[in-house]
Image (cartoon, helix red, strand yellow):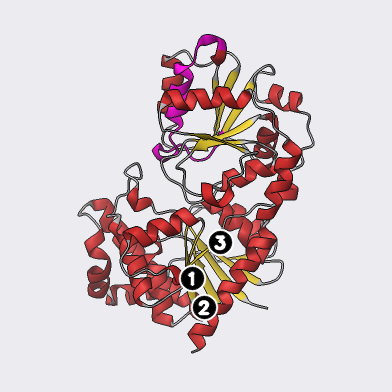
């Protein structure tokens, strides 16, 4: 039985990249000894992870002895991470946290002795984890869920060039990296020096298709429960309320429509995040309360209900890897509406289950939404198509990758 340590941050109980890591972990835990480490939050809010079946959750704790070890590496860590942190009080605290995590994670590695560590990201949060693995000579793999340093809508308190540093150092070690879509891989090869095609494996996100394909409640009951109009075509968008998700463009597209078209459409936003007030204000200022609704507190089961109560899934993000929500929506039988140039499209697109927006303009978005409601769609066919992305299939691809890495490490 393989011992796997999965590493992520800020795990969500709804959807998104961290939900993909949780689903992957739960599936792998059926055949492996699976440990899960959530870097953030530092305290609280991740207790729900302990309820995940067969997953051993690594608890964070403070140790004066580990802090002393971290401080003894102060100058080395300053040299490594200092160039990526702007001078500020917040970043001073962040420096201390990452300094501590490096020695803390080395202690975890010594205690668990995993066969492989699977790191889901290449942001500054993961830098101390990567260094701890290198310090301990522990096999690890990094999965790129998107290349966010290329997206100006992704704001960070650190310099995004650390993503380049992490991947280019991986290339110098001839290390295998995985990417969730072909577009993510292509972006890495085009923008980072030293990476080679053979070192990057494309392994898509997955879905528990059986779970998302069934819903106990009838559609009219769900719509009544969430105050969704029964007589409109519902376009649902699920995900964090951040600028990168670009919700505002769908609202602006609604304003582009003629009243006789707009009255047939309802835009359902499901998620939490810092853009909530701005989105609600835009809806109110532009009298769109009859055409749009924001739900910021949906459980796992309620999310599935909302998928089934909707007619389409829509995603206008400025950047993605391979959106997990694409596959979740397909598993629930929803056609997907998104931009033609969206990352991940080449990995998942099928003309019978997608409607692509040709340009990132409000009028083209509006026209495509109207076109979609005039097409016929087979929800059962769409559900069947999603089965090719079942997590069991995706896990086998990761196991093959783990085998390669472990063999290379032995040599």
> Residue 152, located in which quarter of the rendered image?
top left
Q: Label 1's element?
A: strand
Give yes or no for contact between labels 2 and 1 (Cβ–Cβ under 8 Å).
yes
Is residue 231 shown left or right of residue 369? right
Q: Position of residue 156 (x, y in %)?
A: 32, 49
Q: Which residue is mark 3?
A: 203
Q: Which residues are magenta?
A: 237-260
Mark in the foreground, 1 or 3: 3
Q: Position of residue 54 (x, y in %)?
A: 69, 65
Where 232 sits versus 33, above or below?
A: above
What residue does disc 2 label? 405
Mark 1–mark 3 CB contact (< 8 Å): no
Q: Earlier in the sequence, mark 1 or mark 3?
A: 1
Outermost residue toward the left in this view: 87
Residue for point 65% across, 25% down: 226
Q: Residues within 10 Å of mark 2 (few under 14, many from 20)?
A: many
Q: Secondary structure at mark 3?
A: loop
Which numbered mark, 3 or 2, is in the foreground of this view?
3
**Viewer-closest of 305 and 48:** 305
Give neighbour class at mark 1: few <14, some 14-19, many 20+ (Cα, 10 Å): many
Residue in front for this viewpoint, 43 or 331: 331
Please determine whether, in this image, residue 244 is positioned above or below residue 156: above
User: Does the rendering let one see residue 271?
Assistant: no
- Do the numbered discs 3 and 2 sit on residues whose CB atoms are within 8 Å? no
Residue 396: horizontal and vertical position, in percent? 65, 68
Across and down, in percent, residue 367 comes to 50, 23
Which secondary structure class fits the magenta region best? Answer: helix
Left or right of 284, for residue 115: right
């Amino acid at each position: 039985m393989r011992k796997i340590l999965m590493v992520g941050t800020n795990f969500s109980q709804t959807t998104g990249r961290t939900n993909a890591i949780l689903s992957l972990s739960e599936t792998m835990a059926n055949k492996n000894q699976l440990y899960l480490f959530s870097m953030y939050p530092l305290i609280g809010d991740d207790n729900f992870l302990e309820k995940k079946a067969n997953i051993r959750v690594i608890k964070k704790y403070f140790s004066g002895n580990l802090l002393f070890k971290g401080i003894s590496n102060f100058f080395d860590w300053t040299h490594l991470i200092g160039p990526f942190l702007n001078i500020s009080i917040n970043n001073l605290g962040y420096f201390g946290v990452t300094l501590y995590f490096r020695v803390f994670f080395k202690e975890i590695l010594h205690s668990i002795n995993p066969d492989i560590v699977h790191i889901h990201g290449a942001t500054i949060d993961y830098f101390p984890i990567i260094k701890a693995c290198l310090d301990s000579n522990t096999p690890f793999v990094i999965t790129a869920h998107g290349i966010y340093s290329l997206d100006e809508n992704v704001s960070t308190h650190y310099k995004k060039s650390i993503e380049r540093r992490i991947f280019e150092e991986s290339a110098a070690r001839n290390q295998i990296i995985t990417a969730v879509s072909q577009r993510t891989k292509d972006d890495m090869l085009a923008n980072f020096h030293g990476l080679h095609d053979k070192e990057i494996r494309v392994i898509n996100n997955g879905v528990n298709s059986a779970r998302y394909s069934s819903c106990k409640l009838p559609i009219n009951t769900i719509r009544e429960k969430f105050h969704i109009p029964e007589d409109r075509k519902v376009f649902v968008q699920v995900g964090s309320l951040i600028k990168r998700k670009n919700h505002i463009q769908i609202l602006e597209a609604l304003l582009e429509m003629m009243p006789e078209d707009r009255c047939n459409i309802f835009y359902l936003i499901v998620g939490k995040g810092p853009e909530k007030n701005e989105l609600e204000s835009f809806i109110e200022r532009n009298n769109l309360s009859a055409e749009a609704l924001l739900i910021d507190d949906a459980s796992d089961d309620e999310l599935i209900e909302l998928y089934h109560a909707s007619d389409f899934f829509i995603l206008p993000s400025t950047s993605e890897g391979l959106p997990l929500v694409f596959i979740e929506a397909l598993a629930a039988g929803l056609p997907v509406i998104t931009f033609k140039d969206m990352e991940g499209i080449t990995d998942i697109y099928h003309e019978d289950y997608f409607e692509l927006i040709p340009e990132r303009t409000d009028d083209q978005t509006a026209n495509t939404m109207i076109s979609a409601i005039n097409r016929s769609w087979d929800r059962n066919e769409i559900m069947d198509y999603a089965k090719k992305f079942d997590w069991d299939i995706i896990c086998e691809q990761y196991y093959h990758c783990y085998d390669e890495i472990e063999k290379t490490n032995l040599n």
